[in-house]
Amino acid sequence: MSQENVNTLRWILQQLFGGRRIHPDLLAEDAEWVNPHDAIEPGTRRGADCFNGAISTVFDTWDDVRFDTERVIDNGDEIVALGRIYGRVDAAGMEIASPHGQIWTFRDGRAVRMRWFNSHREALEAVGLSDRGIAGGENPEPRAYRGPPERSV
């Protein structure tokens, strides 16, 4: 099931950043989007509709935002995605480019929880891993994202 979760995550990320929403077939009805305590809107959004609502909020806030996935770590039912997030808000003249980590939890092939972090270290520690045990540590060599696996939903 673990490799299937990795493949599902790749498809989810493609939908999230390509289509700005995740198809309901890939989300559990009780899916949770968890913002860290230091986020502008901290807390947990529950339910597939609220999950996609959180995605809409991200894209409504930023004129341009993307997550370049550098590494995906298979950790059983939890899949860790490490990379860099890039964003721009034209009106404020603000841009970001920083490390970003996400932990996606799966049940029965569907995402039930996504937690995001402002560093690779925080994401790895949240699943009991260390960046020392992961080749490349905080600054891994980026890999090109090849897109989602072939899948119909």
Image: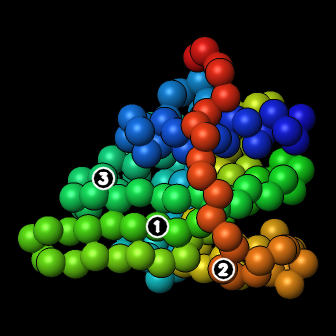
Disc 1 versus disc 3: nearer the observer: 1
Q: From the top left corner, tell me how far across and down residue 99 is, in percent.
A: 55, 76
Name the residue carrying label 1.
85
8 up-or-down from 88: above or below: above
Q: How many numbered marks does the figure carry?
A: 3
Q: Residues within 10 Å of mark 3 (few under 14, many from 20)?
A: some
Disc 3 versus disc 2: nearer the observer: 2
Q: CA distance from mark 1 to mark 2?
A: 13 Å
Disc 1 versus disc 2: nearer the observer: 2
Q: Earlier in the sequence, mark 1 or mark 3?
A: 3
Q: What is the secondary structure assignment of the residue under circle 3?
A: helix
151 relative position to 91: left or right: right
117 up-or-down from 51: above or below: below
Q: Earlier in the sequence, mark 1 or mark 2?
A: 1
Q: What is the secondary structure assignment of the residue under circle 2?
A: loop
128 up-or-down from 46: above or below: below
Residue under the point 33% across and 67% down: 87
Residue under the point 67% across and 42% down: 9
Q: From the top left corner, tell me how far across and down residue 101 is, in percent.
A: 62, 68
Q: Earlier in the sequence, mark 3 or mark 2?
A: 3
Residue under the point 51% across and 28% down: 23
> Which amino acid type is shown beneath numbered disc 1?
Ile
Labels 3 and 2 touching (C-beta < 8 A): no
Name the residue carrying label 2.
139
> Which amino acid type is shown beneath numbered disc 3?
Phe
Q: From the top left corner, tell me how far across and down residue 63 is, in percent.
A: 21, 58
35 relative position to 86: left or right: right
> Which amino acid type is shown beneath numbered disc 2?
Asn
Name the residue carrying label 3.
59
Q: Residues within 10 Å of mark 1 (few under 14, many from 20)?
A: some
In the image, 38 versus 80, the foreground residue is 80
